[in-house]
Image (cartoon, rainbow, N blue to C red):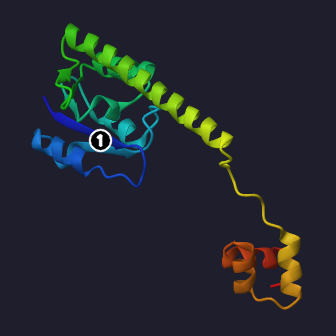
């Protein structure tokens, strides 16, 4: 039996350090820890794909928390079933559960459903907040596009790129790009 570890965070700005430390403390060698900095809402992740290739029958995959493996119930069940068919079990350190045995698989299925329900509640609350903010006049989405004609007019009147950028509330590099695209620089 070999121990493998899997750690995931949702964005590149987040740190994997806490999860990796916990996996090391549980006995997983650093060379057998696979990581992703990607959303758990889909199972197409580089680290997870590599882990799938590396594990063999009787291996055990350690994951710090259930939601680090994935968020969608169907995907989680599919992943756990895939590992189970390979003879590989999954243990969730913080949750104290394992896919080893019938009861372990049942608990994982239930917890996956709870994790998905919580994610749905978060999305609902986010949408409610967005609707409320819109009602109060908050604008979402992309800024209005740049008035290219005004940029060119200002430049032709002798205004420098820095002054145009300040006046228009855009980056100087954007001014240079617009001028280049129009053939003025």
Residue 180 image offset from top left, x and y in percent: 79, 78
Q: Which residue is mark 1?
A: 7
- Report whether residue 183 is seen: no
Furthest-front residue in this view: 136
Q: Quadrant of residue 179?
A: bottom right
State the residue in front, 128 or 152.
128
Quadrant where the C terminus sits is bottom right
Whether residue 164 is visible to the viewer of this picture, yes or no, is: yes
Measured as percent of width and height from the top left, residue 129 is found at 55, 37
Query: Would you say 108 lies left or right of 27 here?
Result: right
Instruction: Indicate the secondary structure of the residue bearing disc 1.
Output: strand
The percent coordinates of residue 100 (x first, y second) are: 19, 16
Query: Which residue is depicted at the point 24% across and 23% down?
Result: 88
Seen in the picture, residue 17 relative to 59 is either above or below; the reply is: below
Q: Nearer the viewer, residue 163 or 60?
A: 163
Residue 9, picture quadrant: top left
- In the picture, measured across the screen, residue 53 lies left or right of residue 24, that is right
Q: Is residue 25 above or below residue 164?
A: above
- Is 81 left or right of 17, judged from the image as shown? right
Counting from the top left corner in percent of width and height, residue 169 is at 70, 72
Q: Nearer the viewer, residue 171 or 103?
A: 171
Q: Is residue 121 left or right of residue 58?
A: right
Please rate how many residues cluster around mark 1, counting C-alpha atoms within 10 Å: few if below 14, some from 14 to 19, many from 20.
many
């Amino acid at each position: 039996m070999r121990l493998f570890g899997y750690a995931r965070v949702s964005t590149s700005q987040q740190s994997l350090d806490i999860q990796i430390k916990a996996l090391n403390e549980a006995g997983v060698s650093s060379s057998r820890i696979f990581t992703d900095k990607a959303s758990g809402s889909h199972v197409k992740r580089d680290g997870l794909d590599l882990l799938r290739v590396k594990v063999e029958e009787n291996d055990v995959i350690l994951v710090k928390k259930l939601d680090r493996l994935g968020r969608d119930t169907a995907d989680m069940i599919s992943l756990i079933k895939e590992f189970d068919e390979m003879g590989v079990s999954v243990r969730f350190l913080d949750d104290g559960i394992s896919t080893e045995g019938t009861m372990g698989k049942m608990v994982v299925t239930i917890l996956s459903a709870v994790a998905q329900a919580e994610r749905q509640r978060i999305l609902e609350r986010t949408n409610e907040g967005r609707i409320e903010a819109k009602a109060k006049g908050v604008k979402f989405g992309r800024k209005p596009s740049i008035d290219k004609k005004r940029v060119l007019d200002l430049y032709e009147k002798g205004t420098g790129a820095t002054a145009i950028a300040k006046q228009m509330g855009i980056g100087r590099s954007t001014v240079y790009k617009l001028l280049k695209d129009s053939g003025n620089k």
